[in-house]
Image (cartoon, rainbow, N blue to C red):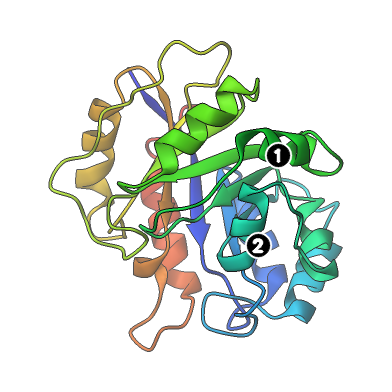
Amino acid sequence: MAHLETVTITGADDSVRPVDLVEISVEFPFVEWGILVSGKRYCEPRFPSMPWLWELARFRDAARVQRSMHLCGSYMRGLLVGEDKLDAAAHALLEFCRRVQLNFHGESQVWRAGDMAGLLNSDPWWTKFVICQFDGHDGRRILEALRDEGLYAVFPLFDVSHGAGVLPEKWPEAIYLDYRDHHSLHGYAGGLGPDNLDREIPRILEAAKNAPVWIDMETRVRSPDGHFDIETVKRCLQVCGQYIDA
């Protein structure tokens, strides 16, 4: 039977203090903070400012703080062709992120698998797990191209709503169940929030068969005026805690 390992909360920005994320991580050690970065979107809702990124990086030694960097725009497109386009603030955060997610947003991409592998095998990228967004376009082909290059710590995130936060009628079944160790980890996103987690998590675990799972929430952990909502995040994590494999 599949089990839930991690809950990613994406989109923290300047409407919340980085120290608040640290405090929540102590209470809910299974939470991972998905930080959106884009070269042109600093200070926008869901995209924190450079000072905010530096502040979060400062908590490098905080116990139990899991972070992932979600690359968008030119940062993501650069990685696909083996080019590191991150600025200093993003690099400071990258050092303390365990995972890097490529957000394709339902668009076709240009990539060179060998050049990608070359970058991902270099410092500081080589220590990161890589998440490919499966959204109906190139995500699966990119993931499998990376695995053909010998990079096996690359995982799928099923997000058929292309990051729009729309709940699917049916969750996709896990498709990588034969990789060694925990490399069959599968992610699920799209429309998850405090009012449907008790219904949707069992459906996700059924679809995932015997694979370990993480879920990702973004749109529905924000207030009606678009701000990152700490209380909603806590409500979600309280529900998810019932499904976390001890």
The spot of residue 88 in percent (x, y) is 85, 68
Q: Residue at x 39, y 58 (%)?
A: 107
- With respect to residue 225, does 119 lie above or below? above
| Residue pointed to by mark 2 | 75
Q: Is residue 136 left or right of residue 90?
A: left
Query: Element under label 1?
Result: helix
Q: Residue at x 34, y 23 (%)?
A: 175
- Disc 1 crowd rating (10 Å Cα; few below 14, some 14-19, many 20+) is some
Q: Is residue 86 left or right of residue 141?
A: right
Q: Does residue 226 appear in the picture of this structure?
A: yes
Q: Nearer the viewer, residue 220 or 166?
A: 166
Q: Nearer the viewer, residue 161 or 209?
A: 161
Q: Nearer the viewer, mark 2 or mark 1?
A: 1
Q: Amino acid at mark 1?
A: Asp
- With respect to residue 37, does 96 lie above or below? above
**Disc 2 to disc 1, how far (Cα)?**
15 Å
Q: Nearer the viewer, residue 88 or 148?
A: 148
The spot of residue 232 in percent (x, y) is 40, 68
| Residue pointed to by mark 1 | 115
- With respect to residue 131, does 121 lie above or below? above
